Amino acid sequence: MSSVDLTQHFLIAMPAMVDPHFSRTLTLVCEHNENGALGIVVNRPIDLNLHSLLEQVKISADGNFRSVPVHFGGPVQVDRGFVLHRPVGQWQSTLGVNGEMGLTTSKDILEAVARGSGPEQILVTLGYAGWAPGQLEHELAQNAWLTVPAQPDILFKLPAEERLPAAMQLLGIDYANLSDVAGHA
């Protein structure tokens, strides 16, 4: 078992993060255990809205979802949709992040959203971020990430561009004040 469980924590990419997939990102860790970690980048909208995504997967929508962005969730399985939502509900394939939030990969949730009967709050991504056993802990030891317990309101009530600064505020830090050089005492 990993020495730390970062499930339901935000990972804030440090300024020195060189991986273009994660530079200046805020990632929600949805699962972290002895098998590794799974997360969703939550602050990187892509040039696709939910209306277009629903059309692509042949789901007709009762409402107009053109203003609902789809996000880059991470570099793994970028052709697969992930819906972060609350409440958790009863869906065919859901990973419970906690008692109030879930991550669903089954089409039934998109069908329910399109009908207007889905979860009240959703964040849709293509792809996810994954770490092998011990990999995230190694990256943390290398000062690649800051961590802070996640606040669902940051995910569901703020626009994408405000999420990273809001998570930094939970730590009492302004992102502009972070150094891109880390050291150890």
Image (cartoon, grey):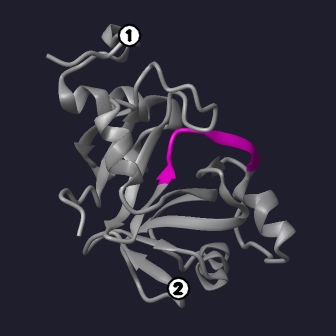
- Dot 2: few (<14), some (14–19), or many (≥20) neighbours within 10 Å? some
Q: Indicate the amino acid at tag 1.
A: Ala
> Is residue 43 in the magenta section?
yes
Q: Indicate the amino acid at tag 2.
A: Ser
Q: Which mark is residue 176?
A: 1
Q: Position of residue 135 (x, y in %)?
A: 41, 52
Image side of residue 92 versus residue 179, left or right = right
- What segment is highlighted magenta in the picture? 40-48
Q: Quadrant of residue 11?
A: top left
Which of the marked residues, 2 or 1, is nearer the chain's N terminus? 2
Q: Quadrant of residue 22?
A: top right
Q: Position of residue 142 (x, y in %)?
A: 35, 32
Image side of residue 171 versus residue 168, left or right = left
In the image, residue 68 above or below residue 139? below
Q: Secondary structure at mark 1?
A: helix
- Dot 1: few (<14), some (14–19), or many (≥20) neighbours within 10 Å? few
In the image, residue 159 above or below residue 67? above
